[in-house]
Amino acid sequence: MTYQRPPEDIARLVNLKPDPLMLFGPDRNLILMADRPMYPTIEELKEPKLKLAGRKINPDTFTPFGARGYFNPRIRNLTTLEDRPLLGLPDDANFRYFTWSPKGTRLAFCIATPTGLQLWTCREEDLRCTPVGAADLNNSLGGMPYDFVGEDFFVIKRRLQGVDAPAPERPVLGPNVQDTSGKEGSNRTYTNLLQSQHDVDLFRHYASGQLFMHDIEAGAERPWAKPGIIAGLAGSPDSQYFLATYVEEPFSFSVPYEKFADRIVILDRDGREVIELANRPAAEHLPPAFGSVITDRRRFTWRSDHPAQIFWTEAQDGGDPRQDVEYREQLYSLTAPFTGEPEKSIRLEMRYGAVRWCREDLAIIVDWEWKSRRQVTRRWWPDDPTRSPEIIHDHNWEDNYNDPGSFVSITLPSDHVVLLTRNEGRELVLTGSGHGPEGSQPFIDAYDLESGATRRLWQSTPPLYERALFFLDEDPDWFILAREQLTERPNYFLRHLDTGEEIQLTNFEHPYPHLRDANYEKVNYTREDGVQLSGDLHTPKGWRAGQDQPLPILMWAYPQEYKDADKAGQVLSSPHQFTRISPLSPLPFLAAGFAVFDDFAMPIVGEGDEEPNETFIEQVQMNAQAAVDTLVKMGVADPNRIYVGGHSYGAFMTAHLLAHTDLFAGGIARSGAYNRTLTPFGFQAEERSFWEVPDTYIKLSPFVHADKINAPLLLIHGEEDSNSGTYPVQSKRMFAALNSLGKTARLVLLPYEDHGYAAEESILHMLWEMGRWMEYEGPSK
């Protein structure tokens, strides 16, 4: 069939103008703004691609497949609110990878050409743009293909020159053969892996590059460091050394390139290797438990407040969190010129999470444990490794109501990040979501380093919903604020923390005025075992419960595992947030006269030693029953026209609800997995493998229960879904089962689409299929 289009009230929600990119300059008085494109066309999704090592690469341009850029870049002055365009650019240019130089005197970016990315730059004072070499950057693996080195130099990753590409078609010389390693270990169900020697040759060719050091003023550049597959490059704060990661052969056929063998080295300013820090094999055989890591050195990071000191960590439990040890992590450091022995630093009781640097007597380090959902934030004295760290927060991350927030960082002129301090360095700053039973109220707190006390500096107040995005680097009293309310989309302000003075930065209009006055209500209810639940109820403008007829309703959810029933029911949104209507959400059907119960709670609780998935089916039944009973009792839902749907894990849930309840007139399952034996090494929060709990995997496969599905089921899937576990074959086999069993089902495969759908034609057709399935004007199925 040809692509179809839903009614215009729904179709007009698809290609709304998105918010622009906003990239602040280092002095925070200037913002680079650039417009984002709308959805691509199917023709754009037809661009060439190679599926290699877990990546999709456009071989014509040496860029990630499907990458899209920006247009109409300009610089806005926050003092005058004047916009200045960039000058000297090609017509209709497509821009990517904008970056300010560390001091903000220059701006750099890439322009996408038919043959690849070309680096351009300009001075902030005049914005006259010039190209930096040819359109030959190598960006096949994603990430930044260049970086500033101070104000006057670039380091640029270009393609290898004079090297012929392998033939695009694989020569058939014999079978593809793989042998087992004899080692135990597990990996998730990855897609687009290497499968042949020809794939190896292609990956090597398109991933390999040569770094160049480019003198901006002289316009000259020279090869810098050794060529190879360069997966990472990070300069030290003093710009005299660089941490480089080279991917090494042999390449793995079992994991994506991020887990390939690699070498970690430090280079000097001239690109010469100073020291090899690690030479690691492919990470193919990790223990199955969440939080498992390699036993080699890992998580290399420059200390941001030191000229050139590198840190890393090493697991002390064999990389297996199931092992009972006193300390799981030992951090080490090595200081320039990197000729001595590594020095032991802090030890951590749980798995290393993150570090935020500040000064010689202050850093913040986080460690965590999956089994207990515990996260500990500690103060650490980097220059005194013998001093024990002090716990600041010991938090269960499922307990959102008591989340203390996260410490705020700023970016130094060296382009390295350090903690924001106030009151002459005696206070740190925390920002948090402020979740609570009445809804979220984001906040800013000051944390006193001496006493450990916090004081509230600012908090969002109803009927507004406001969020602190980040602070100005040079002035801790000014921060960027996003402000919205139920009927007003987010706009951005520069606000003074103490005086409340504000400068408005944007004035975006309401994107869908025809739905501006739709009704919204946060509905709270309880499932039969006492777990508190909630959901977001949207009804059409003017509709009144108890006075108007009940409505057809689309319920949409995504299951979430918890270890604590009390925390499963916590409210994580605000009734004052703007209702964003994504065409990939269920909300467009408000325009068709439907009620929508969006993000209705679907907790799966497994307390103590009980695993949530042992009672998954029973709990989704209880969650759905409680929601349906509430909506019918409120007079919102027509009991004969209640539909349920979800995407990915929500599709998995939908199939189970149709198999194990008779609550719904039909279901919509997008990009789901329905046979858990095809994801045998775990899925979502399931750590156990199929061979450990085969009965659980079989019971949790909707495919096994296809004979129990009596309500109509619409299956939609991208033909090129690369998400772990949700191969298109999942929907194909589910449809084949339903078809053979005489059930009512429809399978829609969207050409060229991945796990999430991108093309305008695909999204419009998806909405048409969903609406047709629920019958806008026809009788209930």
Image (cartoon, rainbow, N blue to C red):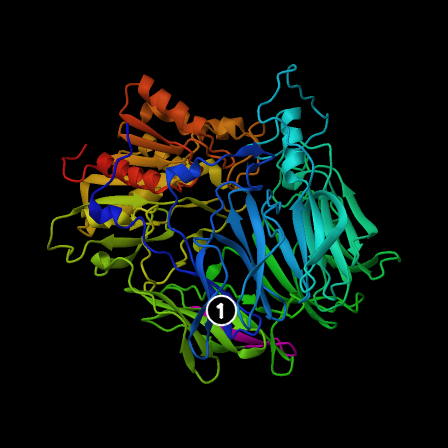
Where residue 709 sits: x, y (%)? Answer: 31, 27
Measured from the top left, where is residue 502 in percent x and y?
42, 79
Tell whether 57 sits left or right of 176. left
Residue at image position (57%, 35%) is: 188
Apparent side of residue 347 relative to residue 525 in the rendered image (left or right):
right
User: Above or below — where is 249 with respect to 326?
Assistant: above
Quadrant of the rendered image containing residue 717 = top left
Picture residue at 32% right of the left edge, 25% below the top: 708
Quadrant position of residue 166: top right
On screen, 734 above or below 464? above
Residue 338 on the magenta span: no
What residue do we see at 66% from left, 25% from top? Answer: 197
The residue positioned 34% from the left and 66% from the top of the image is: 508
> Considering only vertical position in the picture, is 294 above or below 239?
above
Of 469 and 247, the residue lying toward us: 247
717 or 658, nearer to the observer:
717
Tell me if residue 451 is in the magenta stretch.
yes
Total labels drawn: 1
User: How dense is the environment of label 1, judged by Cα within 10 Å: few (below 14), some, or many (20 and up)?
Assistant: many
Please identify the residue farthest to the bottom as the structure is shown. 499
Q: Nearer the viewer, residue 89 or 175?
A: 89
Residue under pointer 1: 31
Q: What range is drawn magenta here?
A: 442-454
Give the image location of residue 630, x and y in percent. 25, 49
Q: Nearer the viewer, residue 664 or 62?
A: 62
Is the N terminus in the top left, top right, bottom left or bottom right quadrant? Answer: top left
Q: Give the left or right position of residue 15, taking residue 298 as reference.
A: left
Question: Is residue 296 visible from the viewing direction of this image?
Answer: yes
Q: Amino acid at mark 1?
A: Ile
Q: Is residue 363 left or right of residue 719?
A: right
